[in-house]
Image: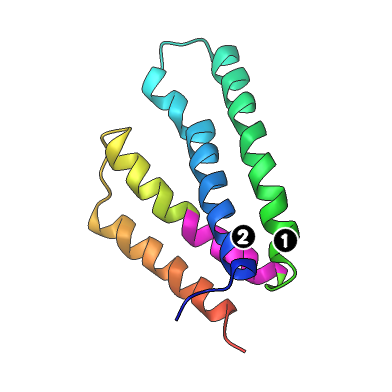
Amino acid sequence: MSLPLDRLLPIVLLLCSNIFMTFAWYGHLKYKSSPLPVAIAASWGIALFEYMLMVPANRWGSAVYSAPQLKGMQEVITLLVFAGFSAWFLDQPLKWNHWAGFGLIVVAAWLIFLE
């Protein structure tokens, strides 16, 4: 079973926007010697691209998903992107308790989709 484009496009845009946002929020942690104002400016610059993807994802996604469903999806995508980013970019793999906590958030997001 494949997802129609109107259901898939918001998910793809949310995934891409979360990649940008994860770099904006956490990428500077790898460069702690950089001055804080530089980190803030770089983060804002990266976040601009995140917004250019997030806003259309939510606008177009609202045609097929409710706002709570979009938010639940976004949270799960954020956790998955962050898990990979933390291990790959920050060299801080998640431990069992992190995965357990994230798993509970995934269950919460799943509940949002029940009708």
The numbered mark, 1 or 2, whose residue comes first in the sequence reads 2
**Magenta stretch containing residue 73, yes or no?**
yes
**Magenta part, dominant SS:** helix
Is label 2 in a helix, a strand or a loop?
helix
Tell me if mark 1 has few (under 14), some (14-19) or many (20+) residues whose alpha carbon lies within 10 angstroms of its own: some
Question: Which residue: 68% across, 41% down?
Answer: 51
- As displayed, is residue 95 above or below residue 43? below
Residue 36, given in percent of the width and then of the height, sits at 55, 15
The answer for how far apart the CA atoms under marks 1 and 2 are is 7 Å
Question: Which residue: 52% across, 34% down?
Answer: 25
At label 1, the amino acid type is: Trp
* Residue 13, numbered circle: none
**Magenta stretch containing residue 49, yes or no?**
no
Is label 1 in contact with label 2 (beta carbons under 8 Å)? yes
At label 2, the amino acid type is: Pro
Residue 33, given in percent of the width and then of the height, sits at 41, 11
Question: Which residue: 72% across, 49% down?
Answer: 55
Question: Which residue: 32% across, 32% down?
Answer: 90
On screen, residue 92 versus residue 110, left or right, reads: left
Image quadrant holding the N terminus, namely bottom left
Magenta stretch bounds:
67-77
- As displayed, is residue 3 above or below residue 26? below
- Kindly identify which residue carries mark 1: 60
Compare residues 14 and 85 and report the one nearer the observer. 14
* Residue 10, numbered circle: 2
Residue 62, given in percent of the width and then of the height, sits at 73, 67
Is label 1 in a helix, a strand or a loop?
helix
